[in-house]
Amino acid sequence: MKLFLDDIRTPEMVYYKTVAKDFIVVRNYLDFVKYIKQNGLPKFISFDNDLGLGENGEVAADGYAAAKWLVYESGLDLRELQFKVHSANPVAAEQIRGLLNNYIQFLKKS
């Protein structure tokens, strides 16, 4: 099971067609959290950061918030998680990578 978090793009826009068919697509932070709570941690997550606007026109929770939820709130063991950040936002992409890599490395040392 692979999860693709992006408000606009499809997995086919980011990955080769043969790889893209295996993804479940979620379009926002709330659906990301809901999916993982209902189905468990996927083996692979592809993160976008900027997830558009919320229902009231406010900036929606982003991919970094989703990564923080995984680390600080989910209670899941992330040691086996594989991920990629496909966001076009270089600063946020590095924040997501840094948070997840550092946390996974910490768990593996514990």
Image (cartoon, helix red, strand yellow):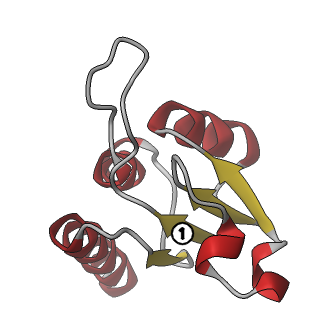
Query: Residue sitting at 61 percent across and 33 percent down?
Result: 34
> Horizontal and vertical percent for residue 13?
63, 73
> Where does the C terminus fall, quadrant-wise?
bottom left
Instruction: Confirm whether residue 17 shows in the render.
Output: yes
Q: Can you name the residue that lies furthest to the top here? A: 56
Residue, far left: 91
Task: Say which of 8 and 63 sits in front.
Answer: 8
Q: Quadrant of residue 11?
A: bottom right
Q: Which residue is mark 1?
A: 46
Front in this rendered view, residue 31 or 13: 13
**Residue at figure coordinates x 42%, y 52% from the top left:** 70
Where residue 85 appears, as percent x and y from the top left, is 41, 74
Q: Residue at x 27, y 21 (%)?
A: 58
Q: Residues within 10 Å of mark 1 (few under 14, many from 20)?
A: many
Q: In percent of the image, x 21 and y 75: which residue is there? A: 94
Q: Amino acid at mark 1?
A: Ser
Classify 77 as above or below 31: below
